[in-house]
Amino acid sequence: MAASLPMTHAEIRGRIAMIPRLDIALKQTPIEEAKNLSQVLGGPRIFVKRDDLTGVAFGGNKLRNLEFRLAHAMKDEPDTVIVGLDLQSNSARQTVGACNKLGLRTILVLEGRQPNNVQGNLLVDYLLGAEVHFARDREEQRAKLDSLAAAVADAGGRPHILNDNPMFDVASAVAYLEVTLEVVEQLAERQLSPACFYMSSSGKGQAGMVLAQKLLDLDFAMHGVTATDEFHIPSRTAAIANQTAAALGLDLVVGEEDIVNFTDFVGKAYGIPSEAGNEAVRLFARTEGIILDPIYTGKAAAGLIAHVREGRFSKDEVVVFVHTGGTPAVFTWNELWR
Ligand SMILES: Cc1ncc(COP(=O)(O)O)c(C=O)c1O
């Protein structure tokens, strides 16, 4: 189905509505102007899209995509969701919370060792009632996913291994296409339009925001800031955007050259807080009372802050920081804040 561009918000929402979906997250999350932060930085108008406030189990960016992934999973009527992720995974925490809302049991196979001090996301996983297993590496994790699924089936249950669910990339992109619509609408109510977005991005959500740029034909920049060296983000993001366009029946091509993603705020490595990221976490907390995290959103905010300090934006431009969640990590890294 070809679409003539630009598309209206209603037309885009119509395409999104073609994908089966459950209602799990709080959507239409608020946007707030960070006036103190702007003032301290001497920078542009900064608005924070509070997608950390999606409701379930401390919220975050995975809840919206879980609405599509779990809708896909529910076709097989599972009673148990089994997922393999990292030890301190935001995705794991939100998955367990979402499954609880659907009345599903969750089994986590987390890569890493069981720590002596259970904190952050892992603590919340236990609080939510997940059955937690640990795996040394990806290979052992995969073997455990399969053996646990077999054990559930042998006992008469119906397991769904979420890692094998094909929806993750497209669902994340669709979710952040929708978030972009929300932001554009929320700013339009204030007679404003965005000049630039900043978001922590490993390529999935950003793909949806780049689609929004094209579909709405609006002149805003989309600055992803990655927290990991694991992927080549421009090629990954373009591939996910094209896959998502196809899923939405849109005749549209996104190229690597359409993707802006900054790799210079990762710090030492993925999962290790950085000085600049920690400064950003403190600054948001101390000017606006907004809690970021030192692994994803703090590093993305460090990108925003560095670019404002370089003078990239004029005073009345509107810059949107998308808060993607991850906040339980402040407790895992508790010694950083005293
Ligand atoms: C808090 C937070 N922000 C951003 C991301 C990156 O999201 P995406 O994979 O959609 O780029 C993640 C992914 O785990 C996350 O937990």
Image: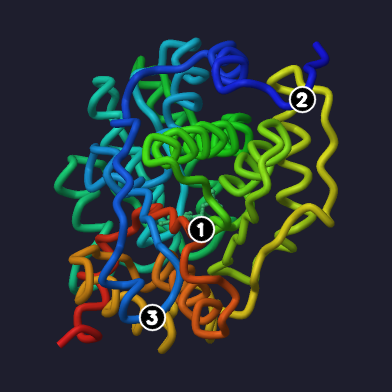
Picture residue at 60% right of the left edge, 76% below the top: 312
Depth-wise, is mark 1 or mark 2 nearer the camera? 2
Please give the residue where the numbered disc 1 appears in the rendered image. Answer: 199
Residue 87, x across and y down, in percent: 38, 61
Residue 144 vertical placement versus 28 (above, below):
below
Q: CA distance from mark 1 to mark 3?
A: 18 Å
Colour theme:
rainbow
**SS label for mark 3:** helix
Q: Are marks 2 and 3 in contact (CB under 8 Å)?
A: no
Report the disc number at residue 41: 3
User: Does the beta carbon of the residue at mark 3 sit less than 8 Å from ligand 1?
Assistant: no
Residue 298, x across and y down, in percent: 39, 71
From the viewer's perspective, tell me whether residue 86 is left or right of residue 139.
left
N-term mark: 1 or 2? 2
Q: CA distance from mark 1 to mark 2?
A: 25 Å
Residue 222 vertical placement versus 189 (above, below):
below
What's the amino acid at mark 1?
Met
Query: What is the crowding at mark 2: few (fewer than 14 residues within 10 Å), some, or many (at least 20)?
Result: few
Q: Are marks 1 and 3 in contact (CB under 8 Å)?
A: no
User: Does the beta carbon of the residue at mark 1 sit less than 8 Å from ligand 1?
Assistant: yes
